[in-house]
Image (cartoon, helix red, strand yellow):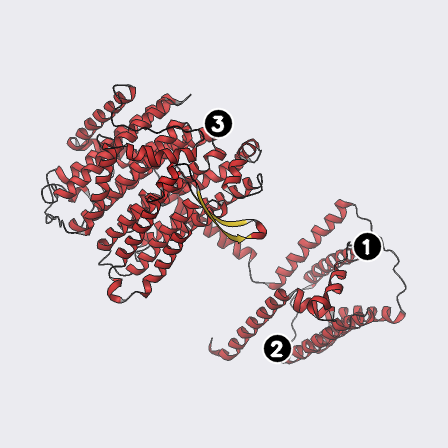
């Protein structure tokens, strides 16, 4: 498993080191990598069927008990096969599709890393590690969606997807950290072992809601679904991969992966099923009136994601089995249909229904491939989609409590899906052509046909022989998601029962609606007009305007708070700090006590009086030179205080620094204009009040700290270890150079950068 991920990284970087002649076929080499990874996981099926769980771990942060942990069970194996298998088809397809575009090396790099990140996510056993891969898929999908970055629509869509999924990712991290405090670990196995304690904890509901926020944003659930149609700005290979087997399925993956921990509660059932059923119906409802191929497929993906989430929310063994089957059903037909849409766009130069039609004669193989996949999407036998629909209906019928509502909405959504699927075939291939554009012809040797043909054949094969899936992958995956799962037996014919008649009614009603939609043109026009009256706003537009409003608010806030006046920054810090400390003194009822203050020599008292007089002189002096001298007196006075109390190092440092500052002040002030009064009388009174308030409270804090006795004293540690560990007798120097070396290095870097900046400004002179 670890080797597979390293191969993805190695091949991604290796793209740029291939000879120029080989780089023409980069996508093919990555496709063979995907085939190799797929073969590796394929050979692990016998182990997984026998109940084995393969694992691997690499030490990461031992102090925090964090390791790079990977796990391969039935569920992660199913996803790994989909990611690598469909990934291979996508890369073969991309070789032909991306041939004429510039920047394909960059595209293949991002797509390879994306595939590796998805694989890393589904194999992760550590939930923090899973989150890292989760966020990597968001960032890489952003880079893929914005491939055509010269288009404003692509940039907006990419930003929208990144903002929403990254926001959900941060919520997911918060939920993981919150619930991780219960078992004291981020290991999936530890969470499962502590499942009962997590569900009974008061943190369960807030943790669940935060994790679900990550799920619904990633898997485009209502009300965050609107980012997914915008992602169609990406090249078709990305759309095919992202919608079928990778990113948008990540939310479903997380739900199923955490089901043993978080499932089985009323909160889980009602929240998740409600979101799923709304998303399911809304996605297909809006797909009906779309006329652009990729847009139709995007909205049907929203429908499918809603189905998957709904089935997880139903939370029965049968519903989870249906979800796992539908995972394969949707991956196969949706990848195929997106590839077909890209192929038609390449040949016909359009993706609009109005510019297509009559292609069955000139593109017969494409017609067959599209028909098989669209029939699977509609749930018509003998395609695999029919078994998925039958199992979904059976799960909905057996849902306790709200089965009638869910079933009615589910049947209505499937009727619309049948109509969308049949219309997809009819408007592209069968309807009479009404455009004058040249009729595209099929190139049967094109690589654009290879991948969709193989996927369509697989969908038909699994439909005719469902035991291939049921007794292997789905059965082992079900055992990983739910305890006590039995055998999974899939068959094409279940006899005459309620589910069969529901399916029959769905298909018949779907055919009737298809007929009406394609013969009564006013029906769709009125439908579209009705939608425009009911839904008067676009969630995508509202999101973008909301972002603009937030940026405007931030700009106004910056003008008020980050105004650029340094004296007001210092004043604000001092006022807030003084108020907070005075309040703490008042609230805690602290008593000011000075124990054994000792006798202060007369010369130290005189030194303090001289320093105070120098401060007053610096404040009211009208002479620059006099003010500088007064400030120097204060600095040297502090140095003498250090020296009196034995801090020789500090005294020397203070004297050197003070001398340098006085010299620099004198040199700079000579070049300055006349001495200005920067504040009036009221402002000086205000400054005096702030200074007295802050200075007094700091004095009180200092006096109070004298009574604090740390046991053991930290000074003892430095005294004991200064010579033995750092080989230095000067404790202060050892602290600065050894014990706080990183602090000192940081300060040196800051000073060096500041000096560099000053030197550049001086060199630039008046040319700025």
Work out whether residue 535 can be spotted: no
Give how far across and how far down residue 93 sits, in percent: 24, 51
Q: Secondary structure at mark 2?
A: loop
Label located before the other in sequence (3 or 1) = 3
Instruction: Please state which of the two labelled residues, at mark 2 or mark 1, is closer to the viewer.
Output: 1
Q: On the picture, is 663 further left or further right than 486?
A: right
Label located before the other in sequence (2 or 1) = 2
Q: Quadrant of residue 642?
A: bottom right
Picture disc at residue 472:
none
Instruction: Please state which of the two labelled residues, at mark 3 or mark 2, is closer to the viewer.
Output: 3
Label located before the other in sequence (3 or 2) = 3
Picture disc at residue 266:
3
How many numbered circles does the render carry? 3
Q: Work out which residue is located at the far top of the displayed protein and give it.
A: 497
Judge the density around disc 2: few (<14), some (14-19), many (≥20) Cα neighbours within 10 Å: few
State the residue in front, 735 or 217. 735
Q: On the picture, is 244 further left or further right than 185?
A: left
Q: Quadrant of residue 713?
A: bottom right
Q: Quadrant of residue 288?
A: top left
State the residue in front, 731 or 148. 731
Q: Secondary structure at mark 1?
A: loop
Picture disc at residue 707:
1
Give how far across and how far down residue 544 sits, in percent: 39, 47
Report the Cα–Cα distance between label 2 and label 1. Answer: 47 Å
Residue contact at pointers 3 and 2, CB within 8 angstroms: no
Q: Which residue is mark 2?
A: 672
Instruction: Please state which of the two labelled residues, at mark 3 or mark 1, is closer to the viewer.
Output: 3
- 497 relative to 339, above or below: above
Q: Secondary structure at mark 3?
A: helix
Report the Cα–Cα distance between label 3 and label 1. Answer: 56 Å
- 736 relative to 39, above or below: below
């Amino acid at each position: 498993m670890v080797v597979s991920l390293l191969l993805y990284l190695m091949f991604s970087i290796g793209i740029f080191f291939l000879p120029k002649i080989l780089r023409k076929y980069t996508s093919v080499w990555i496709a063979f990598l995907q085939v190799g990874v797929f073969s590796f996981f394929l050979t692990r099926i016998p182990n997984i069927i026998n109940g084995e769980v393969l694992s691997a771990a690499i030490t990461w942060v031992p102090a925090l008990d964090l390791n790079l942990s990977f796990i391969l069970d039935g569920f992660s194996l199913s996803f790994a096969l989909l990611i690598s298998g469909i990934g291979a088809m996508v890369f073969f397809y991309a070789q032909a599709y991306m041939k004429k575009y510039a920047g394909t090396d960059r595209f293949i790099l991002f797509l390879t890393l994306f595939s590796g990140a998805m694989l890393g996510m589904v194999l992760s056993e550590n939930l923090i590690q899973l989150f890292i891969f989760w966020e990597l898929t968001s960032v890489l999908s952003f880079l893929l969606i914005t491939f055509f970055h010269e288009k404003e629509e692509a940039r907006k869509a990419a930003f929208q997807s990144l903002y929403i999924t990254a926001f959900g990712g941060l919520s997911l991290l918060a939920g993981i950290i919150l619930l991780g405090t219960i078992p004291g670990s981020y290991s999936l196995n530890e969470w499962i072992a502590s499942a009962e304690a997590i569900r009974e904890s008061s943190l369960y509901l807030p943790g669940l809601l935060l994790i679900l926020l990550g799920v619904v944003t990633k898997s485009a659930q209502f009300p965050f679904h609107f980012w997914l149609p915008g992602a169609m700005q990406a090249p078709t290979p990305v759309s095919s991969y992202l919608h079928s087997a990778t990113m948008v399925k990540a939310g479903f993956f997380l739900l199923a992966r955490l089901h043993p921990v978080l499932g089985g509660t009323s909160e889980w059932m009602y929240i998740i099923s409600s979101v799923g059923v709304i998303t399911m119906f809304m996605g297909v409802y809006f797909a009906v009136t779309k006329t652009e191929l990729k847009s139709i497929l995007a909205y049907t993906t929203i429908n499918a994601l809603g189905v998957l989430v709904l089935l997880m929310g139903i939370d029965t063994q049968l519903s989870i089995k249906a979800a796992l089957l539908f995972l394969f059903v949707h991956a196969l037909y949706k990848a195929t249909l997106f590839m077909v849409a890209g192929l038609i766009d390449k040949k016909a130069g359009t993706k609009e229904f109005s510019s297509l039609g009559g292609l069955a004669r000139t593109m017969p193989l494409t017609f067959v491939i599209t028909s098989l996949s669209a029939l699977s999407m509609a749930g018509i036998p003998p395609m695999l989609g029919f078994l998925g629909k039958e199992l979904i209906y059976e799960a909905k019928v057996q849902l306790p409590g709200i089965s009638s509502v869910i079933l009615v909405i589910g049947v209505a959504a499937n009727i619309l899906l049948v109509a969308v699927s049949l219309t997809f075939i009819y408007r592209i291939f069968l309807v009479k052509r009404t455009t004058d554009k040249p009729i595209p012809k099929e190139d049967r040797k094109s690589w654009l046909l290879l991948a969709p043909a193989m996927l369509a054949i697989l969908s038909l094969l699994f439909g005719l022989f469902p035991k291939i899936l049921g007794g292997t992958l789905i059965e082992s995956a079900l055992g990983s998601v739910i305890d006590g799962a039995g055998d999974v037996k899939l068959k094409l014919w279940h006899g005459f029962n309620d589910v069969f008649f529901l399916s029959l009614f769905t298909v018949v009603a779907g055919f009737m609606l298809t007929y009406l939609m394609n013969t009564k043109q006013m029906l769709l026009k009125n439908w579209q007009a009705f939608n425009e009256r009911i839904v008067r706003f676009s969630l995508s537009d509202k999101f973008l305007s909301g972002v603009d409003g937030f940026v405007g608010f931030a700009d106004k806030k910056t003008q008020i708070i980050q105004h650029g006046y340094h004296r007001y920054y210092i004043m604000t810090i001092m006022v807030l700090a003084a108020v907070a400390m005075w309040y703490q003194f008042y609230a805690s009822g602290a008593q000011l006590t000075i124990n054994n203050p000792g006798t202060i020599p007369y010369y130290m008292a005189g030194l303090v009086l001289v320093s105070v007089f120098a401060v007053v002189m610096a404040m009211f002096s009208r002479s620059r030179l006099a003010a500088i001298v007064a400030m120097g007196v204060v600095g040297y006075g502090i140095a003498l205080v250090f020296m009196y109390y034995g801090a020789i190092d500090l005294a020397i440092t203070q004297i050197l620094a003070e001398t340098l500052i006085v010299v620099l002040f004198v040199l700079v002030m000579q070049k300055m204009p006349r001495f200005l009064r920067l504040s009036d009388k009221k402002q000086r009174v205000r400054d005096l009040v702030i200074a007295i308030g802050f200075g007094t409270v700091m004095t009180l804090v200092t006096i109070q700290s004298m009574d604090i006795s740390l046991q053991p004293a930290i000074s003892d540690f430095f005294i004991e270890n200064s010579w033995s560990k750092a080989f230095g007798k000067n404790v202060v120097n050892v602290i600065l150079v050894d014990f706080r070396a990183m602090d000192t290095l940081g300060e040196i870097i800051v000073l060096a950068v500041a000096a560099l900046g000053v030197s550049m400004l001086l060199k630039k002179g008046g040319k700025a």
